[in-house]
Image (spheres, rainbow, N blue to C red):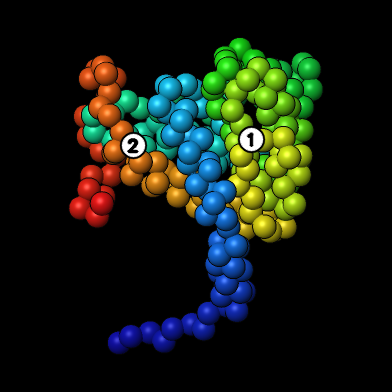
Amino acid sequence: MTEPQMPADPAVGEYLAQVRGVLARLSPEQITAAVDLLLDTWRRRARVYVCGNGGSAAIASHFAGDLNKGANVAGRHRFRAVALVDNVPALMAWSNDEGYHVGLMEPLRNFVEPGDLVIGISGSGNSANVVAAIELANAVGASTLALCGFDGGRLRRLSQVAVHVPSHSMEQVEDAFTVICHVLLYTLRRRIRHEPPAQNPLLASATDAYPGELDHG
């Protein structure tokens, strides 16, 4: 006997409709510019550093992991991505000793070089420690990419490329950030498949991260 279905809470449909609206307003041109920046960094084997706070920190960690594994294409070299938020001892030490606003910038100072790419993720676009990391990156000649919501804040203005989520709902901005990161990954794999094979096979991927995509172009 089939149990009767409970009626859906109207809030569920309302939220899903709002997220669909946010995603529909994303700029494909901004996302394409981010793909171009990431691909250029990959071609030069420069490093990618990603940072954020709270939910954006989790997205930063996720995206760095995706770049390092999920972007792999057979026969091609790999991304070199680091989530600054993953080094918790360094983050805590700098934040405790010198202030939270330098907690990302100071660990970044150990590694960043001209030509690297620094990605700042901030729902408000005004997270002081993310802004400081982007400012340092700009000063040393690294490329900069922002994922930002609300009105874009300082991060949108400071970054070389910005993907802006036009929403003031932090939850929905973070939903969109995750989708954007996966769109970037999906598009990068397709671009990388058309790139020349790696010069050193030992540094190349043996298989595609998502081999099923090969059947679909």
Q: How far across and down, in percent of the image, does residue 131 sit?
A: 73, 32
Viewer-closest of 87 and 193: 193
- Up-down relation of residue 117 to residue 71 (above or below): above
Specify the quadrant of the image occupied by residue 111.
top right
Indicate the amino acid at tag 1: Gln
Is 138 located above or below residue 2 in the figure?
Answer: above
The residue under the point 23% across, 44% down is 211
State the residue at coordinates (51%, 83%). Answer: 7
Which residue: 64% across, 50% down? 164
Q: Which mark is residue 160?
A: 1
144 displayed left or right of 98? left
Q: Residue furthest right?
A: 99
Residue at image mark 2? 192
Q: Is mark 1 on a helix, strand or loop?
A: loop
Determine which quarter of the picture holds residue 65.
top left
Q: What residue type is labelled 2?
A: Ile
| Residue 32 higher or lower than 50, as above or below | below
Of the image marks 1 and 2, the number of the one nearer the N terminus? 1
Q: In this view, does 133 lie to the left or right of 1?
A: right
Q: What residue appears at the point 72 percent right and 53 percent down from the top-left corner?
A: 150
* Quadrant of the drawing holding the N terminus: bottom left
Q: Report if residue 156 is visible in the image.
A: yes
Give the crowd class for mark 1: few <14, some 14-19, many >=20 residues within 10 Å. some
